[in-house]
Amino acid sequence: MSEYKELMALKEKAMSRRRDVIFDNDGGDGFYYSSETKPEDLLRSRTVPALDAGVDTYVYTTGWGFGIGLHDSKVGSVLTTKRGIAKDNKTGDFLKLGTDCLRITSEYVKKRGVEFFWGMRMNDTHDAGYDNIHMDGNKFKQENPDVWFGKGIKHGAYTAVDYKSEKVREFALAYIMDTVDRYDIDGVFLDFFRHPIFFRSNAMGEKATEEETNLMTDFMEKVYLAMNERRLRDQKYYLIAVRVPDSVEYSLAIGLDIEKWLKKGLVDLFSVASYLQFNDWTYSADLAKKYDVPVYPSLDESRVQDAYSRYKRNCLKAYYGRIMHVWDSGCNGVFMFNNSGLKDPYHNVVPNNWFLDDAGDFRKALEVTARGKDFVNTLSKRYFTSFRGSGRVAGGSLPHARYINIPVLNRKEPIETYKGPANSIPIRISDDLDENRKNRIVPKATFFMTISEQPNDLQIRCNGIPLSYEFTYLQDENADTGQYLLKGILPDGSLR
């Protein structure tokens, strides 16, 4: 059998697994519990609940700055500091026991029969904050200050590295393959949308050049070829997954030619979106079908700038609406990142919070997601014209507003309406209303809207049907004036 046929046979076997729900715990669970240094304590924090909920694929991210992380890399450095945010860091303690968080988690997940990916943030810049504790012992960055973006940039973090440098690309490749060689994993998850800035051109406000984009594609090809060597050696098809923007155009602007990656077969499955969303999920579903690669929208938390709006979104019922969108669009499944904005730790500080008592957490969300679309269809949920708004990227990024093709409406980004032609605001409701009616579940839909002036002459319609409403005045402690909250019942038949 030729090497190509051998690889394709291995790939077919690997791709045949069920992947309806993928969970990335986002790393750092070794920071955030303060009990004894025991493997079972680490696992109890996030891993056991996720697996008990029915996750198909588990991603464990260990990076906390390009070149340094929480696993015992022989290429990069290991973050063992116990200062600041890392005061409860168990990494060094586990090393003394002859193990680390990645090995503990990998062995447990594999024992449970669940697929396991190691995750790498491709230009992690956590080291730009937290009093620079993540720079402790980062040998690569300390020895190569010339690859940093440095001071004087317009976008991104000064500690980000420039992938135009061959040193950076070679280090990243070696770091990835060292993990493949030394840990029991089923694949790698390369996160290009957690701090998505890779070139100084972007940092200075310019689009990535053709040369830079080609260098990144070349890097991905080298990862693919190196992985093929391990696939043949181990007779196991290690999968390559990536997280990228849900926009071919914006991806190209930051140096990621994702369509070429898919066409060349460099990616086995991919996740889209992160801090922001550019298109309806059908856009990514169509792209995935074009190249026969599974796609999983990433359901990160809302980062709209208005606290009142944000806390309305970060809850279980809003999450249920979001996963219905994913299923309705034709994507292959749900990718839950971290806690997907559930149980917002600050939601209690906001007055008039609709979701004060039922924000929920990732455990409940995963359990419900694993039960599937038909079950979620029967649940109460909340929909928004825009969940993420225009988005805000931690660490900064190339400006992205002009690439967004979906509504960004929220209290921080309102629209103006005048007497005369109506404003049309799309909102996608993905419930199967006919199926619910067949099962004698009668939907009752309530709409909410905030406006800045008294709505005496405001007329509202849904699909052409006039809506009646009542309103109350909300005093906003963080603004000079309050707003009016409109509330009304949508009559049966107004939703389609």
Image: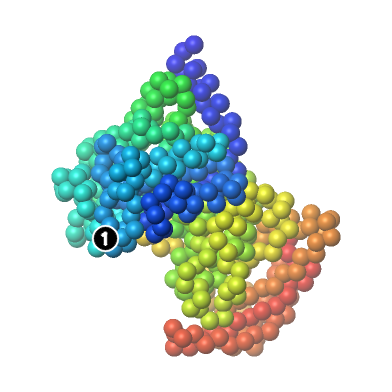
Give the residue displayed 49% in from the left and 11% down from the top: 1
Residue 92: image location, x then y, percent: 29, 48
Give the residue displayed 72% in from the left and 51% down from the top: 374
Amino acid at circle 1:
Arg
Give the quarter of the image for residue 395. Answer: bottom left
Instruction: Report helix, strand or loop for mark 1.
Output: loop
Residue 445: image location, x then y, percent: 72, 69
Give the residue displayed 60% in from the left and 43% down from the top: 20
* Residue at mark 1: 83
Q: Nearer the viewer, residue 191 or 113?
A: 113
Q: Nearer the viewer, residue 144 or 429?
A: 144
Q: Nearer the viewer, residue 217 or 238?
A: 238
Q: Is residue 120 among the parts visible in the rendering? A: no
Q: Is residue 301 among the parts visible in the rendering? A: yes
Residue 71: image location, x then y, percent: 34, 43
Scheme of colours in the image: rainbow
Q: Quadrant of the C terminus?
A: bottom right
